[in-house]
Image: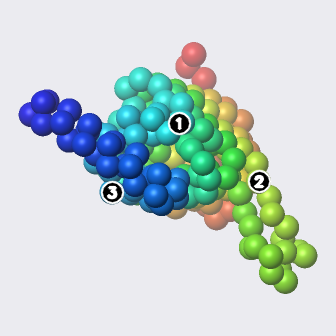
Amino acid sequence: MKLKKIIYSKLYFTKICFIRQILGFSYIASEITNCRSFLLNKYLTRFGAKLGKGINFKDKLLIDNAKKDFSNLEIGNKCYIGKNVFFDLADKVILVDECVISANVTILSHSDCGARAMSKWYPRVQKPVKIGFGSWIGAGAVILTGVELGRCCVVAAGSVVTKSFPSHSVVAGVPARLIKTLEDHA
């Protein structure tokens, strides 16, 4: 079984690199969606992401706005990335060690309505997002541009986080607000 995975991996990367020469990097970013979970670490690092050890990718990963590579993505050691997580890589998305990003979470590093009438009131905003050590983002949550979560934060499922929160915060709602603070056991 291990030999089969190695052969599959080599053939897959050869195909990807060849097609990249023809179709450009946008093909690489779209191909992430179809990539088997056991190949995601290799695939992402091969194209510039900074990944720690022991990352568990559950399944499908969605990436947008990676213009030339995945260098705006940094995932620390022992993180869990659930099914259908969406990373907007217009700016840095940093997950510090031991983060849990549950299924269907969206992390946005920019907002932009384009060159349209609404841009007078809503100009492009692009800022990094950082999720602190040991934080847990619940299923279906949305983390917006420029948010920084401290160490061991919890974001309830379905929440929309529009601002930063300090370490040990438990937040919930739309928009997310502080529900309580976890006791520091460090």
Residue 114 drawn above or below residue 117 = above
Mark number for residue 34?
3
- x, y percent for residue 56: 35, 36
- 10 Å neighbourhood of mark 2: few (<14), some, or many (≥20)? some
Residue sitting at 45 percent across and 35 percent down?
A: 46
How many discs appear? 3
Answer whether residue 168 is visible to the viewer in this image.
no
Check contact, mark 1 vs mark 2: CB within 8 A. Answer: no
The mark nearer the N terminus, 2 or 3, is 3
- Give the amino acid at mark 1: Ala
Would residue 39 be visible to someone looking at this image?
yes
Q: Is residue 37 above or below residue 75?
A: below
Q: Amino acid at mark 3?
A: Asn
Which secondary structure lies at badge 1?
loop
Which residue is labeled 1 in the image?
49
Label 3 SS: helix
User: Residue 46 versus residue 149: which sits nearer the camera?
Assistant: 46
Q: What residue is shown at x 68% (from left), y 62% (from top)?
A: 175
In front: 52, or 132? 52
Q: CA–CA distance between discs 2 and 3?
A: 27 Å
State whether residue 138 is above or below residue 57.
below
Quadrant assignment for the N terminus: top left
Quarter of the image where the C terminus is located = top right
Specify the amino acid type for callout 2: Gln
